[in-house]
Image: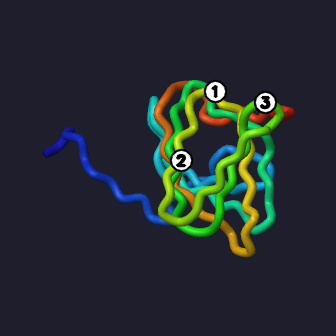
Amino acid sequence: MNGEPRVSRISPEDRRAGQMTAGMTREEAISTDGFWAGLVTTEAGATSGWHHHGTYDTAIYVVDGVFRIQFGAGGSDAIEARSGDFLHVPPGVVHQEHNPGEEPSHVVVARSGHGEPVTNVDGAA
């Protein structure tokens, strides 16, 4: 089996600090050429900075808490997701996350694409 692909396990203590965006903490679990996965925590009442994910398609699964994402012209569109919900953020969509709840929100994020997975910007598109 030497040299063959192997399944790996990434424990919480094995996760690395991911790229920073104000208002959220990213923990990188897996990063390969073309794929990124990790855990994102947004504290109660916190709002992230505006950002996008370049060429990456992003899937988000809400583990717990409330996760609100704003996007569109001037941030005019918003979707609120809760435990058990999935969200899809297409490549290049400028957005901002907010946790309107009273507890931290935790989401699992998986991205497929190339280049920098996070680009912080000054405001909504």
Q: Is residue 104 left or right of residue 56?
A: right
Query: What secondary structure is found at the residue carrying circle 2?
Result: strand
Q: Identify the amino acid type marked 1.
A: Gly
Q: Is residue 52 left or right of residue 83?
A: right
Identify the residue under disc 2: 87
Tell me the crowding category of disc 2: few under 14, some 14 to 19, or many 20 or more residues within 10 angstroms, Cα based: some
Q: Identify the amino acid type marked 3.
A: Ala
Q: Identify the amino acid type marked 2.
A: Leu
For residue 24, above or below residue 117: below
Mark-to-mark CA distance, 2 and 3: 19 Å
Mark 2 or mark 3: whose residue is earlier in sequence:
3
State the residue lying farthest toward the right.
122
Where in the figure is residue 11, as x and y percent of width and height?
A: 45, 64
- Kindly identify the residue that appears in the image at 33 percent across and 54 percent down: 8
Mark-to-mark CA distance, 1 and 2: 15 Å
Q: Image quarter for residue 82?
A: bottom right
Say which mark, if any, is on residue 92: 1
Q: Is residue 101 left or right of residue 16?
A: right
State the residue lying farthest toward the bottom.
102
Where in the figure is residue 124, as x and y percent of width and height?
A: 81, 33
Q: Image quarter for residue 53?
A: top right
How many numbered discs, if any? 3
Say which mark, if any, is on residue 73: 3
Tell me the crowding category of disc 1: few under 14, some 14 to 19, or many 20 or more residues within 10 angstroms, Cα based: some
Query: What secondary structure is found at the residue carrying circle 3?
Result: helix
